[in-house]
Image (cartoon, rainbow, N blue to C red):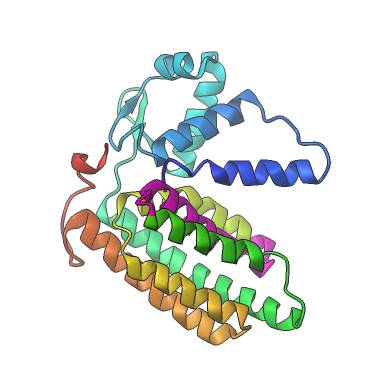
């Protein structure tokens, strides 16, 4: 998920400030966030070797926080160590995509179920977070109409993150956060067909209506369809076989 994906960090920073006094992130954290965003919006394409010195110059930092950031991103799975020295942007293979969806599917289904349950229990009051979920759908529609793919992807990411936030389950939120950037990268690489927006709208209706089982079922359908779209977009088919995501999608 792409050029507008930085809104994730901005939203978190805004939340800290609203709680009274944001703490300035360390240089290592700033470097990690900057490099991660460049990976997600494909300024650093898949398979690209990242040179610590060059990144430090680009970010106008010393090499120490950049080195710390690179190590962190290896742990996150966005970078991988080269055999002798250095790192490169990890190239998504079919197995990576399959594994990601295997984990995301049950978590996203449960997130929708919990979000709908929270809405039902709060009725007739609208719980905090539902308005943000609605807004992400509106942003996605406007971005699609304007043919702003990166902005649409960021809005779709925000929609799924908003469901997790609405579930009000901190353990689920922490678990999903580990997948967030890999999902955003994947969403930015695959096609974004119009029917995915329609599926998001259906999920929202069921959550907003407090119907947890229908919300869960519609989410399951959506995630499985998303998987099919991703495999067709990146590897040409839903069957087995195929290499990593090709260089033609790295620009």
Q: Is residue 165 left or right of residue 152?
A: right
**In the figure, is residue 251 to the left or right of 219?**
left
Q: Position of residue 60 (x, y in %)?
A: 52, 14
What residue is rendered at 39% in x and 78% in y?
221
Q: Is residue 231 above or below residue 22?
A: below
Residue 216 picture location, percent across and down: 51, 80
The residue range painted magenta reads 146-171
**Percent coordinates x, y for residue 89 in the rendering:** 35, 35
Judge whether residue 13 is colored magenta.
Answer: no
When asked about the image quadrant of residue 134, the answer is bottom right
State the image quarter where residue 98 is shown. Answer: bottom left
What's the residue at 51%, 69% (across, down)? 108
- Does the magenta stretch mainly form a helix, a strand or a loop? helix
Q: Nearer the viewer, residue 19 or 171?
A: 19
- Judge from the rendering whether residue 164 lies leftward or rightward of residue 5; answer left or right: right
Name the quadrant of the C terminus.
top left
Q: Would residue 166 be counted in the magenta stretch?
A: yes
- Identify the residue at horizontal 40%, vertical 47% (top origin): 150
Using the image, determine if residue 127 lies above or below residue 75.
below
């Amino acid at each position: 998920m792409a050029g507008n994906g930085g809104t994730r960090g901005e939203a978190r920073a805004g939340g800290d400030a609203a709680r009274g006094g944001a703490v300035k992130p360390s240089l290592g954290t700033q470097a990690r966030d900057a490099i991660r965003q460049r990976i997600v919006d494909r300024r650093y394409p898949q398979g690209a070797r990242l040179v610590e010195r060059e990144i430090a110059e680009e970010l106008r930092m010393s090499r120490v926080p950049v080195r710390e950031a690179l190590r962190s991103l290896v742990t996150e799975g966005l970078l991988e160590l080269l055999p002798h020295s250095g790192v490169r942007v990890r190239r998504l293979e079919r197995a990576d995509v399959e594994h990601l969806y295997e984990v995301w599917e049950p978590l996203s289904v449960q997130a929708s179920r919990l979000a709908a349950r929270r809405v039902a229990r709060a009725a007739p009051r609208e719980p905090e977070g539902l308005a943000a979920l609605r807004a992400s759908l509106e942003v996605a529609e406007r971005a699609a109409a304007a043919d702003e793919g990166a902005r649409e992807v960021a809005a779709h990411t925000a929609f799924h993150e908003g469901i997790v936030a609405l579930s009000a389950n901190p353990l689920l939120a922490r678990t999903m956060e580990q997948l967030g950037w890999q999902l955003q990268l994947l969403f930015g690489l695959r096609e974004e067909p119009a029917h995915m927006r329609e599926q998001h709208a259906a999920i929202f209706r069921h959550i907003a209506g407090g119907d947890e089982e229908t919300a869960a079922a519609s989410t399951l359908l959506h995630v499985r369809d998303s998987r099919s779209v991703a495999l067709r977009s990146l590897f040409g088919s839903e069957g087995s076989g195929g290499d990593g995501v090709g260089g033609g999608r790295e620009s």
